[in-house]
Image (spheres, rainbow, N blue to C red):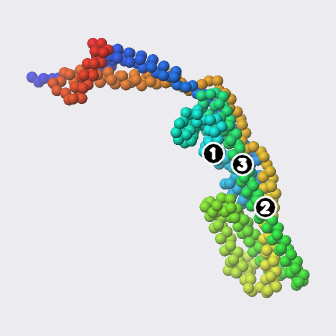
Amino acid sequence: MENTKLVKKVKFTDYLSILFQWKRIIIINLFLIVVFTTIFSFTIPVKYRAVSTVMVSDEGNNVSSFGGMLSNFGSLLGGGLLGGTDATIDKLFSYVESRTVMQKVVEKFDLVEYYEVSEYKRDKTLRALREDAIFDITENGLIEITMIHKSPQLSADIANYFVFLLDSLNNFYIKDYATKFREFVEKRYYKNLRDISKAEEDLENFQSKFGIFAVPEQFEVAFQTIAKLEGELAIKELELNFIAETKGKNDPNYTILKNQVSLFQKKVNDLVSGKITTDVSLVYLKLKDIPKIQKEYFKIYRELEVQTKLLEFTLPIYEQSLMEEQKNIPKLKVIDKAIPPQLKHSPKKASIILGVFFMFLFLHIILVFRLNSILIVKNRDEYNQIEAYEEKIYNIIKKSYRIK
């Protein structure tokens, strides 16, 4: 006859029975933990949260003002001045999170004493401030500047001071960039005036000397074509110089423009040398094949055309740059100024107490099931040293909590 071993099926009530058996340790420990946690939560300093909301304004935007008249130059300006909304907000965040702004806030509100920093005062204070100062963007594209502090009034004052510093620093950089742009355009504009004056004088002297006021139509068309290309080349060179002076030669736009200038220069040289042929009736001649007088006329005429084209380009930019430099329109508009909050931000006592309660409840459930498993181990003939140590703990707990 074969022996059959029946395995008892474990039911849910078996688990409940184990918990009920060890209920004293669970109830007593959790009660003490909740009491201590409640007392501790009342010792945590109360902090308040003040929020200031600002909007990036499009008024006074240098790029948008220039953009209407500049087709080629506008994209270049967009990289320097605060143009697009995303680029603007990124720059503003870099300003407000900078060490310069943070240090001004620390000094004004004596935050070294507030954070009770005794050593490495600068670095530790800045680190603590960056944890309490929060800068974020809303779904509507507004910037929120939040400050958490023990004092309701100071939390609002610091948030508003961040807005003040951010606006001041932003206006300074816009003004500085506008001034640099004006100085660059002004220098190029006055040079353009001198060059065009000289070209007009040279043309007048040429006409007086030789009595020539026109050249054959074929030469004139060729001169105009080459002069037009050289005018476009001069504009590209102007853009290249602007990038080099304001952003440096490592800027990606500099490399792109440099390649464009090289291509324009090659095309002009090919036209002048007669290397390029087209499908139109115009025949490009080599300059060396043109008579000396006509060649001299071509040189003067071409210079006058180039400078005239440049003047058409630089004059409106120069006038606009003068107006932009004088503008004083705030780019940041305060939607909600921070006010002293009435409700505390932290600590959230209920959340702390409930969180600790459920965490220790989970740990006690694991503990009682482990203690219950020691009963099974005791029924074995042999068990290891760890199990022996657990048995001692089991006996101590059972005796202390009077568990049967």
Mark 3, mark 2: which one is toward the viewer? Answer: 3
Q: CA distance from mark 1 to mark 2?
A: 32 Å
Residue type highlighted by circle 3: Phe
Q: Quadrant of residue 26?
A: top left
Residue placed at 51% from the left, 23% from the top? 43
Q: Earlier in the sequence, mark 1 or mark 2?
A: 1
- In the rendered view, would you say 29 is above or below 67? above
Residue type highlighted by circle 2: Glu
Q: Please identify the quadrant where the C terminus is shown.
A: top left
- In the rendered view, would you say 362 is above or below 256? above
Is residue 68 something that shows in the picture? no
The image shows residue 228 at horizontal and vertical percentages of 76, 71
Is residue 99 something that shows in the picture? yes
Q: CA distance from mark 3 to mark 2?
A: 21 Å
Q: Is residue 12 left or right of residue 6?
A: right
Mark 2 element type: helix
Residue placed at 65% from the left, 30% from the top? 154
Mark 3 element type: helix
Q: Which residue position is annotated with label 2? A: 186
Residue farthest along the left direction in this orientation: 1
Q: Please identify the quadrant where the N terminus is shown.
A: top left
Q: Which residue position is annotated with label 1? A: 100
Number of other residues with Cα within 10 Å of mark 3, as a class: few under 14, some 14 to 19, many 20 or more:
few
Q: Which residue position is annotated with label 3? A: 172
